[in-house]
Image (spheres, helix red, strand yellow):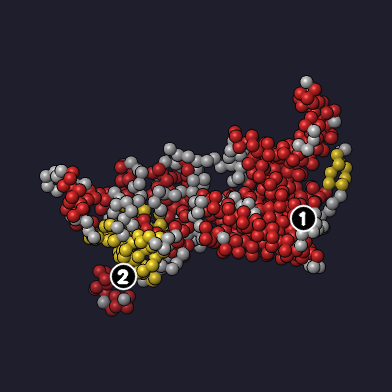
């Protein structure tokens, strides 16, 4: 009885008690969600354009962040360090195309997926061999200050992260929907061979899309790295991106954003208000439970492309 | 060759180098499976040529060898040469081939099902560099030939009917402004009436837009009605070739592909025996 009360009654009383605090929790959830979205976005891009679920996206985030920090430690100015890292990510995209994707044209999705698992290990390994495995501090000059607004405690770093993510998402969504290259990317995602038959060069398309995903990984790496330090555990945030993708749909850029927000907000709110009933630490598994529920009732996610089946 | 033709304009009309020339091509899949055992054929400029034969005869492989889509299926041209407009094209990527005006419409339509009909058509213009206005003009032209697509322009291609998808596939190829379309099995899975409709449009495109067609078909009767020339493939070899009307008059073609017995009806056992004895190998 007490347990039921702590689930169905007490949390709502708490919320009603102090709406400002509730708002603060929600906002911190939104900001965390934006960060998840950013990682999920990298997955969506590659999945949309090549039908490949890129298991190595988390490793790409780590790799980009490590490269950037490494360069900055060598005394390269921030701006150039970011440029060089971007160039490294493009180079990486070219290498991936040449050494991996080219040989797997028209193969089953699962085979490409396995290849990205291998890529994951290579990137983790190479990144750490090249730059070491210590936790490093990343400071690219984003302001990191707490301030109060209307009784809520906010953080400038979180806000700028949200802003950057919002801009990136808008630009990418427009690019996919309205440009010829974006259309070609979507065409390749639907049918490699048909795309080849109308003269869309798969090689350059793949290089483009992996470069863009590398760029997204870099941005995610910068923001996460600033927040939590650049360390091996960055790879694990990719795992948090999975439920985001399942919620939002693997093929939808807005889905990645909204999925991220739902997970972020849900996690925080549930942790704060329902945590005590379950003995805390709900934040760790709530997202996966939600994803599981979605898989059962709406496997394409909220915004994913419907699986078209004609009979 | 061209120099000769210029010197001798009288013979030029008949002697003109064909648009497409396939010489003795051999194709091996996976390094071991020999599928084409020396296929030669030619498509004249502005012609419709039919490539006929049963399942597994090598029609699709021949088309893919020309459009260079074989690579993705681990196939390889190991002998022979393919020329178009007087140039070797065997080493060109599909992208370059489309730029030069040779485009394949694959068997089974292969629309981009999550793109709308119009987006599907626009993907066909990917290789073009002549500006938006020219592309828009081509789009109108496609809608002129396939008015049905204009009505369905905003529907997702995956939800359109089989006939409409075939139209999308052909229209998409037209958007590349091709000289030649390699059309693989357009009749597959379509109602007879739709098959006629599609072939009428092919004929129309051929006459008005001067697009040449190499047409792989199992539906021999229809294909020979619309084509001018035909090749019959069996087991990876051309076993017979000729003008379309002479082929459709040929007794063996009638027997094997049109299902018409010439004289009195034979018993099933006789037919089997006859077939086995008279394989063209």
Q: Is residue B195 left or right of residue A62?
A: left
Give the residue at mark 1: A231
Q: Chain of mark 2?
A: B
Residues under numbered marks 2 and 1 in contact, where contact means CB atoms less than 8 Å apart: no
Q: Chain of mark 1?
A: A
Where residue B146 appears, x then y in whole percent?
40, 47
Label ID, residue B17: 2
From the image, state whether disc 2 or disc 1 is nearer to you: 1
Have a look at marks 2 and 1 and say if they share a chain. Answer: no
Q: Measured along the vertical axis of the image, is residue A133 above or below residue B218?
A: below
Residue B151 percent location from the top left of the image: 45, 42
Q: Is residue A273 visible?
A: no
Towards the viewer: A298 or A171:
A298
Q: Residue furthest top?
A: A1
The image quarter containing residue A259 is top right
Residue B269 in the image: above or below residue B74: above
Q: Residue furthest front?
A: B32
Checking the image for residue B269, the label placed there is none
For the point 17% across and 51% down, the residue is: B274
Q: Quadrant of the N terminus of chain A?
A: top right
**What SS does tag 2 mark?**
loop
The local crowd at label 1, few if under 14, some if 14 to 19, many if 20 or more residues have their Cα within 10 Å, is: many
Residue at x 31% of width, y 76% of height: B1
Alpha-carbon neighbours of circle 2 within 10 Å: few (<14), some, or many (≥20)? some
- Judge left or right: residue A293 versus residue B281: right
The answer to whether residue B94 of the structure is visible from this angle is yes
């Amino acid at each position: 009885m007490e347990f039921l009360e702590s689930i169905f009654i007490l949390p709502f009383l708490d919320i009603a008690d102090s709406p400002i605090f509730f708002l603060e929790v929600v906002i911190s959830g939104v900001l965390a969600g934006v960060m998840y979205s950013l990682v999920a976005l990298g997955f969506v891009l590659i999945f949309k354009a090549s039908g490949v679920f890129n298991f190595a996206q988390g490793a790409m985030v780590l790799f980009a962040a490590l490269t950037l920090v490494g360069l900055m430690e060598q005394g390269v100015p921030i701006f150039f360090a970011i440029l060089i890292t971007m160039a490294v990510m493009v180079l990486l995209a070219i290498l991936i195309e040449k050494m991996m994707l080219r040989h797997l044209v028209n193969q089953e999705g699962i085979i490409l997926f396995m290849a990205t698992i291998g890529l994951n290990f290579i990137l983790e390994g190479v990144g750490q061999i090249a730059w070491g495995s210590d936790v490093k501090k990343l400071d690219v000059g984003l302001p990191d200050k707490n301030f109060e607004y209307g009784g809520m405690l906010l953080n400038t770093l979180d806000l700028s992260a949200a802003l950057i993510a919002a801009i990136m998402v808008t630009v990418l969504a427009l690019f996919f929907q309205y440009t010829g290259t974006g259309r070609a990317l979507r065409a390749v995602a639907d049918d490699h061979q048909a795309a080849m038959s109308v003269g869309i060069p798969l090689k350059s398309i793949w290089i483009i899309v992996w470069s863009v995903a590398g760029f997204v990984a870099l941005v995610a790496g910068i923001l996460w790295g600033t927040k939590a330090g650049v360390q091996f555990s960055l790879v694990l945030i990719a795992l948090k991106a999975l439920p985001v993708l399942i919620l939002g749909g693997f093929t939808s850029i807005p889905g990645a954003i909204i999925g991220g927000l739902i997970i972020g907000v849900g996690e925080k709110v549930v942790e704060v208000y329902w945590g005590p009933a379950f003995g805390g630490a709900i934040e760790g598994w709530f997202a996966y439970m939600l994803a599981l529920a979605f898989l059962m009732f709406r496997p394409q996610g909220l915004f994913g492309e419907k699986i078209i089946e004609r009979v | 060759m061209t120099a000769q033709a210029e010197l001798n304009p009288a013979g030029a009309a008949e002697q003109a180098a064909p648009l497409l020339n396939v010489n003795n091509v051999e194709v091996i899949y996976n390094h071991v499976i020999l599928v084409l055992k020396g296929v030669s054929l030619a498509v004249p400029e502005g012609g419709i040529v039919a490539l006929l034969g049963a399942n597994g005869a090598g029609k699709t492989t021949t088309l893919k060898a020309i459009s260079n889509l074989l690579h993705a299926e681990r196939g390889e041209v190991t002998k022979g040469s393919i020329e178009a407009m007087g140039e070797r094209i065997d080493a060109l990527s599909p992208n370059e081939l489309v730029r030069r005006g040779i485009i394949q419409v694959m068997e089974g339509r292969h629309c981009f099902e999550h793109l709308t009909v119009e987006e599907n058509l626009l993907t066909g213009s990917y290789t073009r560099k002549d500006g938006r206005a020219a592309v828009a003009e081509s789009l109108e032209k496609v809608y002129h030939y396939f008015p049905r697509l204009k009505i369905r322009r905003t529907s997702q291609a995956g939800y359109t009917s089989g006939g409409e998808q075939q139209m999308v596939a052909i229209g998409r190829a037209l958007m590349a402004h091709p000289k030649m379309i390699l059309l693989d099995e357009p009749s597959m899975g379509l109602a007879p009436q739709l098959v006629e409709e599609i072939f009428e449009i092919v004929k129309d495109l051929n006459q008005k837009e001067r697009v040449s067609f190499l047409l792989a078909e199992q539906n021999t009767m229809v294909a020979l009605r619309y084509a001018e020339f035909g090749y019959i493939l069996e087991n990876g070899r051309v076993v017979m070739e000729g003008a379309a009307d002479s082929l459709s008059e040929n007794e063996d073609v009638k027997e094997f592909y049109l299902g018409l017995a010439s004289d009195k009806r034979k018993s099933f056992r006789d037919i089997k025996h006859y077939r086995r004895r008279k394989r063209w190998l």
